[in-house]
Image: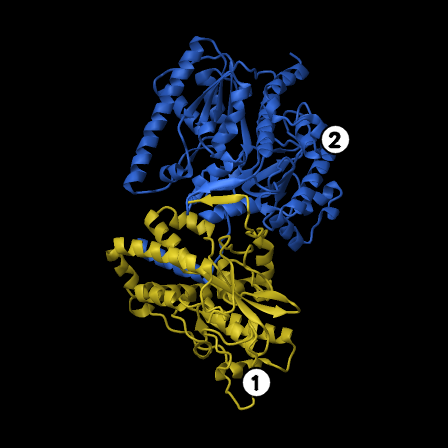
Chain colours: A yellow, B blue
Amino acid sequence: MRAKGYMPQRPFLTLQAKGALSLSFIILTHLRMLRKLRVLPTGAQRYVVPPLQYELPEYREGMRSCRSNEKYLRSTLHCDIHDPLLVAMADRLGAFRVSDHEFVEAAFDLVKESMMLDERPMDGVGATLRRGTGTCFHLINTFIALCRCAGIKARYKVFAMNMIRTWYDAVIQPDPFIKRWYDSLGYFVLEGEGEVFLDGEWVVANVTPEAEWQAAAGTPINKLGEDSLGSWYNAVPGTVMYMESIPYGFAGALDILHTIAPGSMERVNLSILRQQEKGRAIIAEAGGIEAYDRSARARQGPRSPMVRMENKAQITFED
Amino acid sequence: MGYAEYIKGFNSLVQKYIPVESTWTPADKAVYGNSDPYRVPQAEADSIRLDAIRYQFRRHYEQNRTYHQFCKDAGITPADINVLADLDRIPLIPSEFFKESPPGREFASWLANIYTGEIPAVKITGREPSRDEVVNAFNKAGMVVTYSSGTGGRHTFTPRDQRSFNTCEYAMAKGVVSMFYPIWNPQIRSYLLLPNPFKTSLYAGKLATVFYDITEEVDCAIDREIDTELIRHTMGDDKSLKGKIVKTVAARGERKAVSDMIAFIERKHKAKEQIGFVGSPYLLHSVISKLKEEGKSFDFEDRGVVLTGGGWKVHENERIPEATFRKELDEILGLGPEHVIDLYGMVEGNAWLTQCTEGHHLHVPSCYLHPMVLDDDFRPVGYGEVGRFAFLDASMYSYPGFIITGDKVRLLEHCPVCGRPGPVLEPGITRATGQGSRGCGEEVRKVISMDMGG
């Protein structure tokens, strides 16, 4: 368990502990307000999982999956690389027949553009593929599982995200109560990307946002190798963690959110659907995905440096 | 008095801000090596600026690991920067970067890791120190960490060393004194429309330190300890009891400051002394309004100066036009428009652009500041175009002062009024709108937070 990274890393534990403490305090002091999170959207507005955007392949005897026990190549928590549906999908994408680059690109495209983002409790890669939707961690999980199944090393990059400045200033900051929730949830609700080992180096794979959702946000359509960090969002410095496995406790945190706030989670999913629709219109108006991406990249602006947090011996802390 | 003697008098008062000449680097020469930063012939200024910026770029590239990687990712090295036209290639840091600091212990590490070179030994008390505690610990160790007032509750933090801070103070004061020639003199009794610089690390307060050296006596509108906690309570919409109390005290404090300033004006007018107001125009505007309300006016007969900075918002959603402000000062205090100038600077840089008294355009100190205006695609545009202001500041030692600001400006090749060499910014700088970003978890945070508030 420890070798595979099931035990959470210290920054993860710190973030989750901070979030749990902060949220617990807020919940205990505002129990009545919790009701708002449980209220489901009315009648016509219920969330329905969108139709699957690909055909489910059938597993056949003889389809291969990687059998190595090497780090980043093996099954880990929620990431069963021998799941029959996953193996069949990897086979369809060309596992063990095409080059690593071609396979990774195909897996990237499948997960990023054919699987949709929605909020739900954690489950495994088979269920995610069958459904075609999931949180960013479901999607990253699926991408990583496909790569590992095909014998290509892959890992998770997880971090706490810094807030959306313009939106925060306009919406969150004015209300200290909302601000407390928002800031507390920031410890709890982490973001992630996948990374895959190609040509001797780790390459970023941000598979979460499909093109329509990115168009709604006005950001470029990211490609394999393009890091979202420092580009269209920033990690809280010191919170970036590389993991072989989703750690224990992570799924629990998602479960807690869904238990406390089922209404809010459904509203998130409805919001995502609306944004996808908006994004489709934006892409159409731009003249297609490539045309939209060109103009979004031109508008994107400069990257920010990523602060590499080295320990400095000159700084000492006295309790 | 000739200008040479005038500026010699100024330099004698600010010796402690000037490094020994034999140790001057190209960056020091750019700041300290001219008698009037706004009258250096353009070709000479270009050459000095290029040397200074190349020097600093190499320093930051070699000694700042964060910036080094940033440049590497952009594919730019010091070997690529040889002529003036190459300066546009130097990787720029968005000003928002300085707002992205983590809390607690990591904040200390963040400050140290964005700093060029090695920080001194810093001892911090507490398991989970507050930002104020970290800032105070760094400053106790000899650094000058400052922060902005924090729009939206997010402060800009900048770790200057003493050398960079001294340069900042000197550059600002020299720019002002040279523009005010021959009006400024050390007998001016000044009133800071700012916090006491020795009781705060707020940049808007700290930067006024030098006025204690170049004027006779100094009063402060806000003479109390100011930290990020107080700012949060005062400026946010904190509905807690503590927040309400702090806001009430702040409002009373402002009313007291207005009466104190009126008393100051009355005393100095009676004594026929020279006065100088330095700082945010909103407080002086409140004083002028109160005097008008009371039917009072004073004629200082141009025995005074007013130096403003920090923007022209006088109340939420209300801006006062600069020309109106100058007219009121003339009518109510007898200080003509040539006695009133505005400064443009920012917490992220040492660069100070100073208005000329003739046309009130903001002059660029061309020996050490390379100004740029960027279009919506963040590419440099020519003179006369409106765009986002960016600059390369050769005076900044402690981190790369190569910044993209959040301000929309128009850069002119020359001042249309005063005839000094070098480019200027037109008055009337506004804020550029920012871009959003989105993540999966961000959606959850947003909706839950709004649901709770709704």
Labels 1, 2: one chain: no
**Numbered circle sitting on residue A64:** 1
Q: Quadrant of the C terminus of chain A?
A: top left
Q: How many marks?
A: 2
Q: Amino acid at mark 2?
A: Glu
Q: Is residue A69 above or below residue B272?
A: below
**Numbered circle sitting on residue A122:** none
Name the outermost residue toward the left. A32
Q: Using a 10 Å C-alpha cutoff, classify the residue at mark 2 as few (fewer than 14 neighbours), some (14 to 19) or many (20 or more).
A: few
Image mark 2: chain: B
Question: Whole-percent x and y of residue A65?
Answer: 55, 82
Q: Is residue A265 above or below residue B19?
A: below
Question: Whole-percent x and y of residue A89?
Answer: 53, 81
Circle 2 — which element? Answer: helix
For the residue pair A45 and A210, the one nearer the viewer reads as A210
Residue denoted by label 2: B44
Task: State which mark lies toward you, 1 or 2.
Answer: 1
Q: CA distance from mark 1 to mark 2?
A: 71 Å
Q: Is residue B379 visible?
A: yes
Name the outermost residue toward the bottom. A61
Name the outermost residue toward the front. A318
Q: Is residue B405 left or right of residue B42?
A: left
Taking the spot 73% from the left edge, 37% from the top edge, the residue there is B51
Taking the spot 72% from the left edge, 46% from the top edge, the residue there is B78
Q: Amino acid at mark 1?
A: Arg
Question: Whole-percent x and y of residue B133?
Answer: 44, 40
Q: Is residue B334 above or below residue A132?
A: above
For the residue pair B394 and A285, the one nearer the viewer reads as B394
Q: Is residue B94 left or right of residue B328?
A: right
Q: Using a 10 Å C-alpha cutoff, classify the residue at mark 1 as few (fewer than 14 neighbours), some (14 to 19) or many (20 or more).
A: some
Q: Is residue B250 above or below residue A283?
A: above
